[in-house]
Image: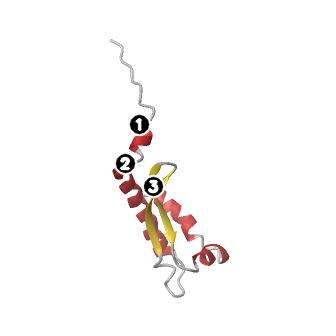
Protein backbone atom coordinates (compact mmCIF):
# COMPACT_ATOMS: atom_id res chain seq x y z
CA UNK A 1 0.00 0.00 0.00
CA UNK A 2 1.47 3.30 -1.10
CA UNK A 3 1.17 6.29 1.12
CA UNK A 4 1.86 9.87 0.33
CA UNK A 5 2.33 13.00 2.29
CA UNK A 6 1.13 16.35 1.09
CA UNK A 7 1.93 19.14 3.55
CA UNK A 8 -0.54 21.94 3.99
CA UNK A 9 0.73 24.93 2.04
CA UNK A 10 0.24 27.25 5.01
CA UNK A 11 1.50 24.92 7.78
CA UNK A 12 4.89 26.59 8.16
CA UNK A 13 3.34 30.05 8.27
CA UNK A 14 0.84 28.89 10.89
CA UNK A 15 3.55 27.27 13.00
CA UNK A 16 5.87 30.27 12.72
CA UNK A 17 3.21 32.63 14.02
CA UNK A 18 2.31 30.79 17.24
CA UNK A 19 2.88 32.17 20.72
CA UNK A 20 5.33 29.33 21.47
CA UNK A 21 7.40 30.30 18.46
CA UNK A 22 7.36 33.93 19.62
CA UNK A 23 8.58 32.79 23.06
CA UNK A 24 11.38 30.82 21.41
CA UNK A 25 12.45 33.83 19.35
CA UNK A 26 12.45 36.08 22.43
CA UNK A 27 14.52 33.51 24.35
CA UNK A 28 17.09 33.31 21.54
CA UNK A 29 17.27 37.09 21.29
CA UNK A 30 17.79 37.37 25.05
CA UNK A 31 21.02 35.38 24.54
CA UNK A 32 22.11 38.15 22.18
CA UNK A 33 21.12 40.76 24.76
CA UNK A 34 23.34 39.13 27.38
CA UNK A 35 26.23 39.01 24.91
CA UNK A 36 25.72 42.66 23.93
CA UNK A 37 25.58 43.80 27.55
CA UNK A 38 28.81 41.92 28.33
CA UNK A 39 30.66 43.21 25.26
CA UNK A 40 29.39 46.79 25.02
CA UNK A 41 31.93 49.58 25.40
CA UNK A 42 31.59 51.45 28.67
CA UNK A 43 32.23 55.04 29.45
CA UNK A 44 29.20 55.77 31.62
CA UNK A 45 27.50 52.35 31.44
CA UNK A 46 24.32 53.81 29.95
CA UNK A 47 24.77 52.17 26.55
CA UNK A 48 25.52 48.75 28.08
CA UNK A 49 22.42 48.92 30.27
CA UNK A 50 20.06 50.09 27.51
CA UNK A 51 19.58 46.88 25.51
CA UNK A 52 16.01 45.59 25.22
CA UNK A 53 14.40 42.57 23.59
CA UNK A 54 11.02 43.23 22.01
CA UNK A 55 8.67 40.66 20.53
CA UNK A 56 8.00 41.43 16.88
CA UNK A 57 6.16 40.20 13.83
CA UNK A 58 8.52 39.93 10.89
CA UNK A 59 7.05 39.14 7.48
CA UNK A 60 3.97 37.76 9.23
CA UNK A 61 6.02 35.44 11.43
CA UNK A 62 6.83 35.50 15.14
CA UNK A 63 10.15 37.09 15.93
CA UNK A 64 12.01 39.36 18.27
CA UNK A 65 14.33 42.33 17.93
CA UNK A 66 17.24 43.52 20.03
CA UNK A 67 17.44 47.30 20.34
CA UNK A 68 19.44 49.81 22.30
CA UNK A 69 17.45 52.73 23.65
CA UNK A 70 20.33 54.98 24.73
CA UNK A 71 20.11 58.36 23.02
CA UNK A 72 23.69 58.00 21.80
CA UNK A 73 23.39 54.36 20.63
CA UNK A 74 23.75 55.22 16.95
CA UNK A 75 27.05 56.96 17.67
CA UNK A 76 28.39 53.99 19.63
CA UNK A 77 27.29 51.59 16.92
CA UNK A 78 28.56 53.55 13.92
CA UNK A 79 30.77 56.52 14.81
CA UNK A 80 33.07 54.61 17.11
CA UNK A 81 32.67 51.40 15.11
CA UNK A 82 31.60 49.14 17.99
CA UNK A 83 28.80 47.48 15.97
CA UNK A 84 27.65 45.65 19.09
CA UNK A 85 24.15 44.99 17.76
CA UNK A 86 25.51 43.63 14.49
CA UNK A 87 27.94 41.35 16.31
CA UNK A 88 25.22 40.15 18.72
CA UNK A 89 23.58 38.32 15.80
CA UNK A 90 26.20 35.56 16.12
CA UNK A 91 25.25 35.05 19.77
CA UNK A 92 21.57 34.90 18.84
CA UNK A 93 22.17 32.34 16.10
CA UNK A 94 24.53 30.17 18.14
CA UNK A 95 22.28 29.93 21.14
Q: Which mark is residue 82?
A: none
What kind of colouring is applied to the model shown?
Answer: secondary structure
Callout 3 secondary element: strand
Residue identified by numbered label 2: 18
Q: Which mark is residue 63?
A: 3
Q: Residues within 10 Å of mark 3 (few under 14, many from 20)?
A: many
Q: Which mark is residue 11?
A: 1
* First reached walking from the N terminus: tag 2 or tag 1: 1
Quadrant of the rendering where the C terminus is positioned: bottom left
Percent from the top left, x then y, of residue 3?
Answer: 36, 17
* First reached walking from the N terminus: tag 2 or tag 3: 2
Percent from the top left, x then y, of residue 57?
Answer: 47, 54
* First reached walking from the N terminus: tag 1 or tag 3: 1
Q: Residues within 10 Å of mark 2 (few under 14, many from 20)?
A: few
Callout 2 secondary element: loop
> In percent of the image, x 45 and y 32: which residue is there?
9
Callout 1 secondary element: helix
Label 1, label 3: how many angstroms apart (C-alpha)? 17 Å
Numbered circles on residues, count: 3
Percent from the top left, x then y, of residue 62?
Answer: 43, 52
Position of residue 72 in the picture relative to residue 49 (left or right):
right
Q: Is residue 79 above or below residue 26?
A: below
For the residues labelled 2 and 3, say whether their Cβ atoms are less than 8 Å apart: no
> In percent of the image, x 44 and y 36: which residue is there?
10
> In percent of the image, x 41 and y 47: which residue is there?
17
Percent from the top left, x then y, of residue 39?
Answer: 50, 74
Q: Residues within 10 Å of mark 1 (few under 14, many from 20)?
A: few
Label 2, label 1: how many angstroms apart (C-alpha)? 11 Å
Q: Is residue 43 above or below residue 25?
A: below
Amino acid sequence: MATSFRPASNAVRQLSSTSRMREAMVTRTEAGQRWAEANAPRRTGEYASSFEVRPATIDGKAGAVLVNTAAHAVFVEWANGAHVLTRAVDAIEKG
